Every structure is written in C-alpha cells, then in structure tokens.
Amino acid sequence: MLGLLWVCALTACASNDSFEREPFEEAAGDDVPAERAGLGFTREGALERAAPVGSERARQAEAARVVRELWEVAGASGAPGEAWTFDYQVHGGALTLLSFRRTTQGQGTGSAVEWNGFSRELTRSLSTLVGVKPRRLRFTLERGPERWRIGLETVRGQVAAHARTVPEVLPGASGPLRSDALTVARQLLPAARLPWEGRVRERARLQFEGLRLRTEAELRDFEVQEGSGRRSAPGGTDLRMPVVQALLPFANAVGSREVEVELEGRHVRGEAEPRWTVVAATTLEPSEPPEAMEDIAREYRAMQEDILRHWRQEVKESARLAGVWSFEQLAYWYVGGFIAKGVLGAMEAVAPTVVSVLGRSGAKGAQWFRTVLIRTPPAEREALQRIWMKAEAEGLAALEAGEQAELRALLKDMEHRLRTPITDKYSKDKLREWARQEYFEVHHPQLAQALGKDLLGTYQVHHLVPIEHAHLFPARGVNAAENLVGMAREVHSSVNSVWTLVRTNAKNVSAKDVEEIARITHKHFGRWFHVLYDSSKSGAALASAEKAALREVAAVLGL
C-alpha cells in the first residue's frame, strides 16, 4: 500500500518565503458565507446565485483529477530518488494548478509503480483534507525504490487571480485543446537540437485564453548542458506526449494567463530516442490592476468562471446563460473583458466614445455601460453575448472573420445610439427604476431611512439632465450619482413645469442650453434636494422659485 506522509506545515518541503505557513488542520473547514453587497455580487466579487453550486461529488472529482495530474506529470515515469513539488490553489473546494517543479533528479530504475497503488488512498483522503477555504497547497512527491511518498502542506497567501472558486466534474481535455498543446509541443521540441548522449534545457512562455492554449510559444532561452552537439539524437516516434500531458492541467483555470515552462531533453547511451520532460511550469501572477479598475477586475473574474463552467457543460446553455444575469453583471463582464483582453484600442475607430469612457472610468464605466446595454435592441444584445462568450471561452483568435466584423458593427451601432434620443418606453422605465433603486439604496440610504416606508413613496428621483436629453451628453452617465436628486412630489412637480416649458417651446435645444437649464433648476430648487420637505414651511417659497425659474428658462429659450 502506498505510504502517505501527510505533513502538516511543520516538516516536509520548505515553503515559498513570500507566504506564511499555516497549520493544515486550522486551515480546513468551510468559509463563512460572504455578505451580499451591491447589485448582483458579493463583497468578494463572487456572483450571487439563487442556488448553491459545487456538490460533494464535484469536490471528490476535483481531488481525483489532481491525483491524475500528479501521476501524469511525475508519477508514471519517475526514477528512484526523484522529487517534485506541486502547488495548487484551493477555493470553495475547487483545485487550480499554479506550478510544479522537479527538485531532485532521479537515478537508475526501480520497481514499477502501479497507478492503482499510487491513487488509492490519496484519492480517498484528499477531498476531505483540502476543505473549501482559500489556501495554497503544496504536494511533495519523493520516489523511493518501490513507491512514491507524498507529503502535503499549506502556505498562506493571496488567492490566485486565475483560480476557480466552484468545484466541478471537469471533462477531459477537448479535442481543440489537445490540438493546441500538440502544436505548441511541436514548436518547442524541434527548436532544440539535442546532442547525442547529451542534455539541454529550454525555457518558453505560453499563453492560455479561457479553455484554449494559444499556439504561438515564446522561446526564452536554450542551453546545452551536456554533449558536444556534433551529432544530434534521433527523433523517431512522437516525443511530444509528455510535454502535452504537462501542459493540459493549466487549462483548468480562469481568464487569460501566462505560463512559463522549463523543459529538459536528455539522450542516454544505449537508448534509441531522447526523453523530453517538462521539469518546471509556473503560472505567472498578473500585475495588479489600477485602483480604479479593482472592482471591475474582481467582478469580471466571477463572470468569466461562470461562462467557462457552463461552456464546458453545454455550449447551447451558455448562449442562454446571460438571461439569468442582471444588466449590471453583464456590464461588468463586458467592460472587464474589453480591458483585460486589450481590445479597446482596436475598437476606437468604430466606438470612440465607448473606448474613452471605459478606458478611464472603472466601476463608473461599468455603470455607464449598463445604460448603453439597456438602449441596445434585444437581438443585438443577444448577438453581442454570443460572440463575446466565445471570445471568453476560446480567445479572441477563435472568432471567425464574420464574427469579428459583426462585433465591430454592433459596437458601431452602440456608438451611434448614444447620440440618438431614447424613445422606447422599456428603456426609459428601466433607467428610472435603476435611478430610484440606486439613489435610495446606494447614494442616500440615510434619506430613505429618515423618510420611512410611508413617506418614501411620495419622494421622486429626478434626473437633473432629463433622460430625453441624454443623447446630447453621450459620455456622461444619465444615471450617474451627480445627475440624480431626490425630492418631494410637490418639488418635482415644480421642476417638471420647467422642463415642460422646454419641451413645448424648443424642439432642438443644444447641449449648452440643457446644461444652463439644469443649472437654473438647481439654483432655484436645490434647497429641497436630498432633504425632508415640509409643505407648511416651504409652500410659498416653492411657488416663488417656480416662477423665477420659468422666467430665466424662458429667457434662455428666447421666449
């Protein structure tokens, strides 16, 4: 039976100095449920879901997959004395491979290790031991004469940005992914001339995008460590499979990520062909997003994971997935994706306003883009979702020429629509609904509390620049906090009389006129914005303010 050495953060291999050790038993257990905050996301950026996700069966499947990955990278072919470390991120029971490294090279041959013996006890114990709390696990594998000894420790650190948070029964590698890996392996192996009875080292960087691996490897360096190079080792049968097996586990992550790999090629005297091994591979941590983009990045990762999870299960279901997401969630997903994939520059020619706002506004940009989405016809929203889901799951390079052209056309139509008056009732009603919700729940909850249930219904949320004139200010958010004011029904009636004068006497007001009229309304009615209103004390003053405002607006309109 396989002898397991479960090391509980006191012995075994040394941890990375950048992480603090944590007793494994203390780290086990469930997370405290995240508090819900905002509209559609938890405080940690995870999606709020109507039902729990990730069953015990899924957690067991995660553990079984990890055991298989340990076996395929190291266990099936290791020599006595060989040692490896594997680092995984645990989150919610999901296990994401971060890196592995051969720490000691083995020598000679020992008794063959059978898969059943390697996996039996480890698979049975692992899903219980890892728990669901966010942590990094380090496996150590040491090859004895007859069996592998396996140790486990945990090191504390930040959750990896590309880690999954929902355990899944993942399918095997798809045909396209295997094809990607074979193509990359073909680039790596012929690039190195392996000397007869020699050894070489090679480093390269690979790009993963969603569920796919980009097929252009970036070769970093190549070194002949042994052998003269006067004669090359033979090729013969396909030597790529060990490389492919080492690359495939890194596809089980989220988003765009870069993996640096180190390969060793050896030709041993008396053997017909060389051996190639990936002796180290590390997922590089992305740079921290600018502070203004932190919220976008966090919520975007949650959307990415949901898309990939459904895409793995059934593509058709993924196409309908957006139907259960709020417009806010969709906006965070699009904006996060446009920024993370670096496509804003390519979009500037067809959608300059969209690019300008999204490139500098962070979470406010996502809120602005939500108002753009609501103005987009349902058929165009569905087309955008379909195209962008494919880009998320398989990368931008997977989009066919027709899909790329369709994406540009959709964004161009959005840009045009920003300068077109909002006329459909659904869009206007939805914008007013969001404005009221955000005003009282996000911007001025104290006022809502002071009003109480009885008076809250009598208070209106007004757009300083009305919805009907939003097209004159395409880069501004019609529902931005600075454009929303709460006021009593009586005050709102007086303010509306000003805009009714505009509506009935000026068909083509300019942006400058609208800004001046908004300034006039703020000047005369601002004392009643965001406060409790007492009609017994303010009735006469309100009537005087309305008359004065109407006179000034009439002068602006030349009446």
Image: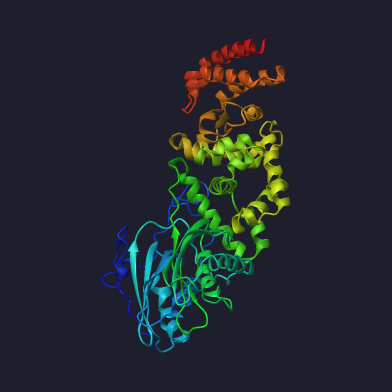
Quick check: can you spot residue 485? Answer: no
Q: How many marks?
A: 0
User: Which image quadrant is residue 294 in?
Assistant: top left
User: Residue 414, relative to residue 46: is it above or below?
Assistant: above
Q: Is residue 236 left or right of residue 9?
A: right
Location of the C terminus (image quadrant): top right
Give the image location of residue 380, x and y in percent: 71, 46
Give how far across and how far down residue 336 sits, in percent: 54, 47
Query: On the image, which quarter does residue 346 sit in?
Result: top right
Q: Quick one: 537 or 229, which is closer to the camera?
A: 229
Nearest the viewer among 43 and 71 is 71
Is residue 187 in view?
yes
State whether residue 137 is above or below residue 523: below
Q: Is residue 473 above or below residue 364?
A: above
Q: Residue furthest front?
A: 230
Side (left or right) of 369 relative to 117: right
Percent x, y for residue 399? 67, 54
Quarter holding residue 7: bottom left
Q: Quadrant of the N terminus?
A: bottom left
Seen from the viewer's position, the closer of residues 344 and 526 is 344
